[in-house]
Amino acid sequence: MTEHFDEIVYWSEVKLDIVQDYAVAYSRILANQKRFHHVYIDAFAGRGLHISRSSGDFIPGSPLNALNVLPPFCEFFLIDLDSQKADALRQSTKEFPSVHVFEGDCNSVMHSEVFPKVRHEDYRRGLCLPDPYGLHLDWTVIRTAGQMKSIEIFLNFPVMDMNRNVLWRDPDAVSPDQIERMNAFWGDNSWRQAAYTTELNLFGYEEKRANDEIAAAFRTRLKEVAGFAYVPDPIPMRNSIGAVVYYLFFASPNRTGSRIVKYIFDKYRERGAR
């Protein structure tokens, strides 16, 4: 049976704990305010269960973790491109009428099916995980969430994918397909200025900036372009040798959420590698 489940590594388990901690606080605050209809959104939901590489145990994924939050979310919108994963998710959540599972590309499903149900003026609020492990998310989804003022997001900034496929020593050697992926995630080609200095090195190439500088530029972009009022410093998620695999960002329209996430990030910051 294990071959049917995705295997996750330690830093993914840390991320699940971070999101779960915040989901509990978020749902409690929104439920206590009564007037809000708060929802949970997962754009890369998977099948709901994983296998821990370190222990071999089954690990509930973020959708099943969210279903266990008390007080509960009012609705759940779960999306996956893989039909088998979507079917497994429907099966495991069939006893929950508040769960809506969508099979398809989250970039289109979010715009057409989910975001219209989380409008600020309708007293709707949402905690969203547009949470790719690679450059699979369009900036339009991020920017729309920021402009809506009703959605808070946790977002993987996939710096390992970027370094492997786009942010090369000679950026002119990168394939057009990879450039297109990066442009779609970043929103335009301004990542080139964020990722490289104008000074040439001994080989005649522009110097690539450090990962944390590129992440800092994206943080500024989340605030100034997408329109999120609060974007705390992201937490770097590291592999077993200490290399940053991705940065976990949180972005929100409200100060309270940012304050809580800063506390949670600090609690888990030293658990980012093993």
Image: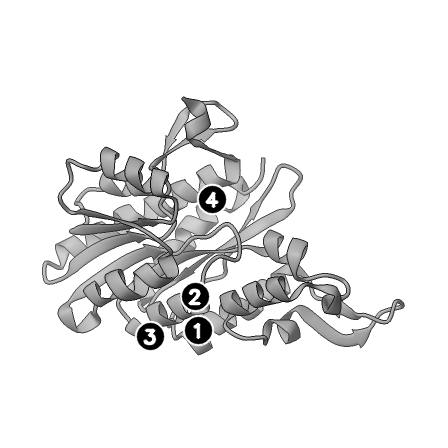
Viewed as shown, does residue 178 lie left or right of 252? right
- Residue receiving disc 1: 223
Q: Nearer the viewer, mark 3 or mark 4?
A: 3
> Quadrant of the image for the N terminus?
top left
Amino acid type assigned to the residue bearing label 1 in the image: Lys
Report how far apart the C-alphas of labels 4 and 1 lie in the structure.
24 Å
Amino acid type assigned to the residue bearing label 4 in the image: Tyr
- Residue receiving disc 4: 268
Viewed as shown, does residue 81 lie left or right of 246? left
Report how far apart the C-alphas of labels 1 and 2 lie in the structure.
7 Å
* Mark before the other along the chain sequence, 1 or 2: 1
Q: Determine contact: label 1, label 2, CB under 8 Å.
A: yes
Q: Determine contact: label 4, label 1, CB under 8 Å.
A: no
* Mark before the other along the chain sequence, 3 or 4: 3
Q: Nearer the viewer, mark 3 or mark 1?
A: 3
Report how far apart the C-alphas of labels 3 and 4 lie in the structure.
29 Å
Q: How is the image coloured?
A: one colour
Q: Position of residue 171 (x, y in %)?
A: 72, 67
Report how far apart the C-alphas of labels 2 and 3 lie in the structure.
14 Å
Please report the residue visible at 35 percent of the width from the left and 63 percent of the height from the top.
108
Q: Determine contact: label 3, label 1, CB under 8 Å.
A: no
* Mark before the other along the chain sequence, 2 or 3: 3
Please report the residue visible at 47 percent of the width from the left and 50 percent of the height from the top.
266
Q: Residues within 10 Å of mark 1 (few under 14, many from 20)?
A: some
Q: Position of residue 69 (x, y in %)?
A: 23, 42
Circle number at residue 231 = 2
For label 4, the SS is helix
Q: Residues within 10 Å of mark 4 (few under 14, many from 20)?
A: some
For label 2, the SS is loop
